[in-house]
């Protein structure tokens, strides 16, 4: 075993040592001038030891580290957890931004119907899409991605690591939320619903239909499933026996909405205006599902209601051209004690994929500050997504997902100089 000395070490602005190609899930050690664990205070002159099983084995001051012989050692000025993009369409939306022709790489929105809860992101996710590698090169190691806004219910989301040769290798959680949209974004894509009231009415009707479907299924299950009409079991003659309730024909759309009603999936509602968000909160109160607000441009005008409802917010990209958006909304939500995360989202113009680091940096410069901004793209989204036992902070036992920088991650002149996912060195070049 090699033990580091007690003297502190200086990490140059751009320095990555021992850059041999690392096999998947091989053990690797990272030395950081400053290590942001996010779950605790930053550690100066720190070491992270990533195990062969893909998890973090040890974290702490360099002076106390015991580095196993023969492992690759990477060095960087600043190390953070791998970034978690709270809301994206990457993997369904491609780099070429093409809907026509021989190359079509825009699968995030199906326009044949405004209500399609049965669509699954996992059936469209392309792990080899160029955009997956591109966002990874900027430190994003985990994506909450799937069908984008623009339909009343556009489909199911998934959580993926930005690695793997196929969707099976990339998937962290195959289904996480059901994506819905309120407001003008829907009417611009579909003739119906044409108004906000019609959209809410259609969504309420769909949820009531799903509830009735669940009731039928449960009654049939409780009856015991006699396919021949049931057996009274109480001595009545066959002519007097009542037939057992039969399950309804399988309906994938109602099943997906039923998972929302049963609390198995969250309903992710893209809503920007006060009226749209208030409608989403009323739906949540009526049906009791787990609601997550998406984009929420005017959330700073509805702080008390959002906080009382206990609803988290996946905030629009700070620099997005959303109506009544503000650079200071992230700081306002943080000060109000409302759980939130910053996302890259989706917008119908080029570029459709934003750089998560830059969006967090603008929020940091507008009242959020460095530490809270870093949490908003790491541990906070991990908590909201329910995956903070694996990602979002640098702690022993969690996935060894790390981003290496040559300076302040939110400084424009800094570069990301290495990305590690589950102990695998995915890149080791500054960009």
Image (cartoon, rainbow, N blue to C red):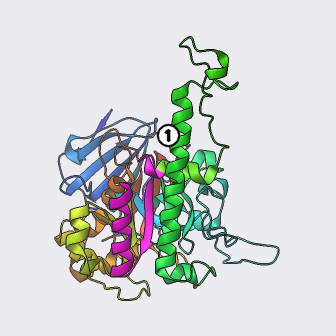
Looking at the rendering, which quadrant does residue 148 occupy?
A: bottom right
Residue 276 visible, this orientation: yes
Please name the residue that numbered disc 1 is placed on. 26
Indicate left or right for 389 with 192 as reference.
left
Q: What residue span does the magenta drawing correspond to?
A: 260-289
Q: Is residue 279 magenta?
A: yes
Indicate left or right for 106 with 294 as reference.
right
Task: State the residue in front, 147 or 373.
Answer: 147
Extreme right residue here?
Answer: 102
Up/down of 121 relative to 362, above or below: above
Residue 175 visible, this orientation: no
Image location (x, y in percent) of residue 428 = 49, 60
Image location (x, y in percent) of residue 333 = 24, 72
Up/down of 64 relative to 376, above or below: above
Question: Quadrant location of the N terminus?
Answer: top left
Up/down of 28 relative to 224, above or below: below
């Amino acid at each position: 075993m090699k033990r580091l000395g007690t003297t502190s070490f200086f990490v140059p602005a751009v320095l990555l040592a021992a850059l041999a190609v690392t096999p998947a899930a091989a053990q690797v050690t990272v030395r950081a001038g400053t290590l942001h664990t996010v779950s605790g205070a930053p550690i100066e002159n720190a070491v992270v030891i990533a195990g062969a099983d893909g998890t973090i084995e040890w974290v702490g001051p360099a002076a106390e580290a015991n580095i196993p012989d023969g492992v690759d050692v990477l060095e960087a000025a600043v190390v953070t957890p791998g970034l978690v993009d709270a809301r994206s369409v990457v993997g369904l939306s491609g780099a070429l931004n093409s809907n026509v022709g021989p190359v079509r790489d825009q699968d995030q929105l199906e326009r044949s119907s405004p209500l399609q809860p049965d669509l699954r992101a996992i059936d469209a996710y392309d792990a080899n899409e160029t955009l997956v590698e591109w966002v990874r090169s900027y430190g994003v190691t985990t994506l909450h991605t799937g069908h984008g806004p623009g339909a009343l219910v556009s489909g199911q989301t998934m959580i993926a690591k930005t690695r793997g040769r196929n969707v099976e290798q990339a998937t962290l959680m195959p289904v996480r939320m059901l994506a819905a949209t309120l407001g003008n974004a829907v009417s611009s894509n579909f003739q119906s619903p044409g108004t906000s009231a019609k959209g809410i009415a259609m969504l309420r009707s769909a949820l009531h239909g799903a509830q009735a479907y669940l009731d039928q299924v449960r009654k049939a299950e409780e009856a015991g499933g006699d396919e021949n009409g049931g057996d009274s079991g109480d001595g009545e003659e066959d002519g007097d026996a009542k037939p057992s309730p039969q399950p309804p024909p399988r309906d994938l759309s109602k099943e997906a909405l039923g998972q929302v009603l049963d609390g198995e999936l969250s309903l992710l509602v893209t809503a920007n205006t006060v009226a749209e968000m208030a409608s989403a909160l009323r739906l949540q109160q009526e049906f009791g599902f787990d609601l997550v607000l998406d984009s929420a441009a005017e959330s700073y005008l509805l702080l008390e209601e959002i906080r009382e409802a206990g609803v988290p917010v996946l905030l629009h990209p700070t620099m997005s051209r959303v109506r009544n958006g503000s650079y200071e909304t992230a700081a306002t939500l943080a000060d109000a004690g409302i759980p939130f995360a910053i996302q890259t989202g989706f917008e119908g113009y080029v570029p459709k994929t934003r750089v998560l680091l830059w969006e967090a940096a603008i929020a940091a410069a507008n009242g959020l500050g460095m530490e809270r901004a870093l949490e908003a793209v790491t541990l906070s989204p991990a908590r909201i997504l329910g995956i903070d036992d694996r990602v979002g902070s640098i702690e022993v036992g969690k996935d060894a997902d790390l981003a290496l920088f040559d300076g302040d991650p939110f400084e424009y002149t800094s570069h990301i100089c290495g990305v590690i996912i589950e102990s695998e060195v995915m890149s080791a070049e500054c960009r």
